[in-house]
Amino acid sequence: MKKLALLSLAIVLVSACTTNPFTNKKTLALVPNSQLFPTAFQQYDQFLSENDVVTGTAEARMITNVGQRIATAAERWLNANGHQGYLKDYKWEYKLVNSDQVNAWCMPGGKIVFYTGILPIADNEAGVAAIMGHEVAHALANHGQQRMSAGMLQQLGAVAGNVALKNEKDRALFNQAYGIGSTVGVMLPFSRSHETESDRIGIQLMAIAGYNPDEASKLWERMKAKSGGQAPPQFLSTHPSNDTRIANLKAWAPEAKAEARKFGVTSFQN
């Protein structure tokens, strides 16, 4: 019975894997986009109804304009690489929300929020494009779907361990070790890998959209200065360290310019 259950689980996991065109990796998709996107869209609308959305300003128009340029760059890349129709279920939306938070985020399916608090760090339109490219990349790489799938597997592992262990003391030790081990050893590295993927995809998209990819590392230098260099150790964080991101983005900028040249882009806006 256990072998049958394990075989069934293996079949489900294999059938739930899809290959992402931007990462060329097989990714886990236990929750299909057909279910995930509508839920995300509803949550996004609810968030907007409960927060102070900025409209009619130059900054709000810039957020929309940059978002549209990045999304167009993504579609151009997909079409050129034989992935026409990949974005058919995406419904791009870009909103500026009045908040001191130094943050921006993207929900599955292309629903993006910028907080006004991040605009001084962005500093210029190319800085906004670096952030936008990163957030759009999360949606394109289906990172939300992967995190949800990984969380489901993490919970499944916890349940399996508790069922297998009959002794209450053993279960308590297992839960403690499993909680720390699966988070530090699996979930946090998983999240950091997503951030790195989004940085790499995003810097290419901003370049194809005509923005200077050299501005991406400068953005993170400003982020580092804003934080005063205070951050948890990288292995305990959901994100790579500022220094890691800065070094990566500097190294990837020439590649991004080379990719943009394939689309006829030879000059870049700051």
Image (tube, rainbow, N blue to C red):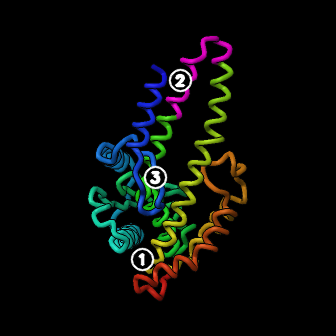
Q: Position of residue 154 (x, y in %)?
A: 53, 34
Residue for point 38% across, 60% down: 95
Residue 81: quarter of image: bottom left
Q: Which residue is mark 1?
A: 209
Q: Nearer the viewer, residue 193 or 26?
A: 26
Residue 5 drawn above or below residue 265: above
Do tag 3 and tag 1 residues touch (Cβ < 8 Å)? no
Label of residue 26 in the image: 3
C-alpha span from label 3 to label 1: 27 Å
Label of residue 162 in the image: none
Q: Position of residue 158 (x, y in %)?
A: 55, 26
Q: Residue furthest top?
A: 167
Residue 72: quarter of image: bottom left
Which residue type carries mark 1? Answer: Ala
Which residue type carries mark 3? Answer: Lys
**Is 218 left or right of 124, judged from the image as shown?**
right
Do tag 3 and tag 2 residues touch (Cβ < 8 Å)? no
- The answer to whether residue 61 of the structure is visible from this angle is no
Residue 168 drawn above or below residue 22: above
Q: Nearer the viewer, mark 3 or mark 1?
A: 3
Q: Nearer the viewer, residue 21 or 187?
A: 21
Residue for point 40% across, 82% down: 263
Q: Which residue is mark 2?
A: 160
- Circle 2 packing at 10 Å, graded few (<14), some (14-19), many (20+), is few
Which span is picked out in magenta?
A: 154-171
Q: Main secondary structure of the magenta part?
A: helix
**Is 229 left or right of 26, judged from the image as shown?**
right
Which mark sits nearer the N-terminus, 3 or 1? 3
Q: Position of residue 156 (x, y in %)?
A: 50, 29
